[in-house]
Amino acid sequence: MIGIELPTLNTNDSSYTLVEWLVPDGSSIEGEEPLALVETSKASEEIESTGPGILHVLVGGGQDCRPGQTIAYLFESAEERDSYRASAATPAAASAPPGAEPSITNAARALADRHGVSEAELRGLGRTVIRTADVEDLVRRAASAPASPERHLSKRQRTVGAVVTESMRTVPAAAAYARVDVGQAEELARQLSERTGSFVSLPVLLIKAVARRHAAHPLMFAALTDDGVVRESERAHVGVTMDAGRGLYTPVVHDAAELSGDRIADLLTGFRSKAFRGTFQAAELAGANIMVAPHTTEGMVLATPIVFPGQTCVISVGAVDDQVLLDAQGTPRTHRFVHLGLVYDHRVVNGRDAMALLKDVKAELEAPAALG
């Protein structure tokens, strides 16, 4: 008998949700293959078998589980599994310890999260299995009740809050800003979009421009360890803040300096779809050593994001702003400007370093031929 333990999928959550088993209880497993889908506050991750055997499920779909918990066994034979079941005090499907959480279907949990229904309210229903109809009933009752000034934050938003709090507590941040004429960059983005069929945008070119400066500005892609040592990175892995109405995500464009503009554009398009559906894999959210934060809603000029713990800087970009300036002959011409903001960990990066990176990124975007 081999136990299948739930690994630690991230450092933000003390518990996860086992969304569903990908193979039925009692199935014969041939080797390493996906067994279950587990959801954290940020992503969905497949749990694989550790070898061949007969699957015996201990934690049902929709239930919460913790890192290190044994969620299933693999038996050498069906006879060994039958012997275990016969000797167990309770069936495998009900093998959770006394006081275990109710089983909540994935659809019910998503609906509860969307309407701010708390875990305590779900447990208060006193049901063994909580389905969508149960959550809908809670929402209807809440709507008919007198208005309350309180609103429960979703699990995902509480995780975002924890990261922000940790950043504010541990990172002494400073900021610098630059104004960039992006007229040529926008024209390049248009040409690339027409030629490749991908949606190449200004943030795509910004990601490429930032990644290309990795070798010249290694401290901007470094991590400060607890013992005061800076660990530099070999490649530029650029995270992108993204919110499609389902919470904040930070997917990562790995090896961004090696990718073409249209390839980065295709990755961002896929990330937006996953942000809307909430279907990221953990690997897609891991490994960033610098962050780009687009704030391109019309009218947004400046943004000052947080430095994510474990990184040294984040670059924001605002919306494009048209300005009329006189050229050398005194003729009025319209220019397209954005403001780049660089927030940095002042323990590692000084103002001179920050302005040098901004100057280089500004140069890349104002003469963008190498970004295609």
Image (spheres, rainbow, N blue to C red):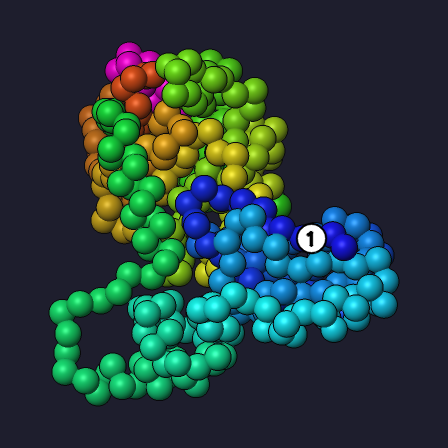
Residue shown at the point (51%, 58%) measured from the top left: 65
Q: Is residue 337 magenta?
A: no
Residue shown at the point (30%, 25%) measured from the top left: 344
Along the line of sight, which residue is nearer the eye, 99 or 347?
99
Q: Position of residue 35 (x, y in %)?
A: 70, 59
**Mark 1 belongs to which amino acid?**
Gly
Q: Position of residue 223 (x, y in %)?
A: 43, 22
Q: How many marks?
A: 1
- Give the vertical position of 124 relative to 358 (above or below): below
The reply, left or right, for residue 66 in relation to residue 314 is right
Residue shown at the point (57%, 58%) measured from the top left: 38
Residue shown at the point (46%, 38%) measured from the top left: 239
Quarter of the image holding residue 331? top left
Magenta-colored span: 350-361
- Give the vertical position of 351 relative to 49 (above or below): above
Within 10 Å of the Cα at label 1, are there few (<14), some (14-19), or many (20+) other Cα atoms?
Answer: some
Q: Which residue is mark 1?
A: 3
